[in-house]
Image: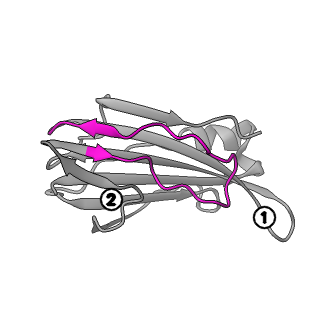
Amino acid sequence: MDAVVQRVLTSWTKKSRGGAEATRRNAAPTAFLLPSRLSSALHEVAMWESESFVPRMQVRDLLNPGTVLREMDGLLRVDPPEVTMFGMPRRNRRPPAVRLAPGQWLQWQINYRFVGSCGGEWSYRLETFNIFYGSAEPGAFLGVPSHRVDERPSLR
């Protein structure tokens, strides 16, 4: 399958929910340049509050991209991303799968709130899946997506 997935993870605590820290968190990108000559790969980017939201990147095989990808009738079917059972809010109803034609891309965003096991402190996570059907140029995800799914309810 010729597809490129960029999975961007941003993680923070209550400290970054307001003021200057929230400004820094909100400035964290949800899409990045891809490494050159990338095809059939997972480009993972992680940004943590504890590291001042500095992006950490790695490239992996497209074995477990966090969502199910299937080619059907000349299109790429993208099922909703996997969700963790430990995060809130619960997601009993999910959006339907998205079908991409060659050269199209999808941005799917999903967020979570977690309660810490020891002190009860909340933490938050935003996952953005940028998925391109075909071989992607480095700037493939820097424009407007062909399709967009937003699963970001309020996490009060």
Q: Residue at x 67, y 55 (%)?
A: 87
Q: Which numbered marker is on residue 43?
A: 2
148 left or right of 4? right
Q: Position of residue 150 (x, y in %)?
A: 50, 34
Residue 152 position (above or below residue 82): above
Q: Where is residue 68 in the image (x, y as percent from the top left)?
A: 35, 55
**The C terminus sits in image quarter:** top right
Q: Which of 153 and 8 is in front in this view?
A: 153
Q: Which numbered marker is on residue 116?
A: 1
Name the N-terminal-most of marks 1 and 2.
Answer: 2
The reply to whether the magenta stretch includes residue 92 is yes
The reply to whether the magenta stretch includes residue 87 is yes
Where does the magenta region start and end?
77-103
The disc labelled 2 sits on which kind of residue?
His
Q: Which residue is drawn at 62% across and 45% down?
A: 91
Residue 51 seen in the current view: yes
Q: Nearer the viewer, residue 96 or 29?
A: 96
The disc labelled 1 sits on which kind of residue?
Gly
148 left or right of 70? right
Residue 9 position (above or below residue 24): below
Q: Which numbered marker is on residue 54?
A: none
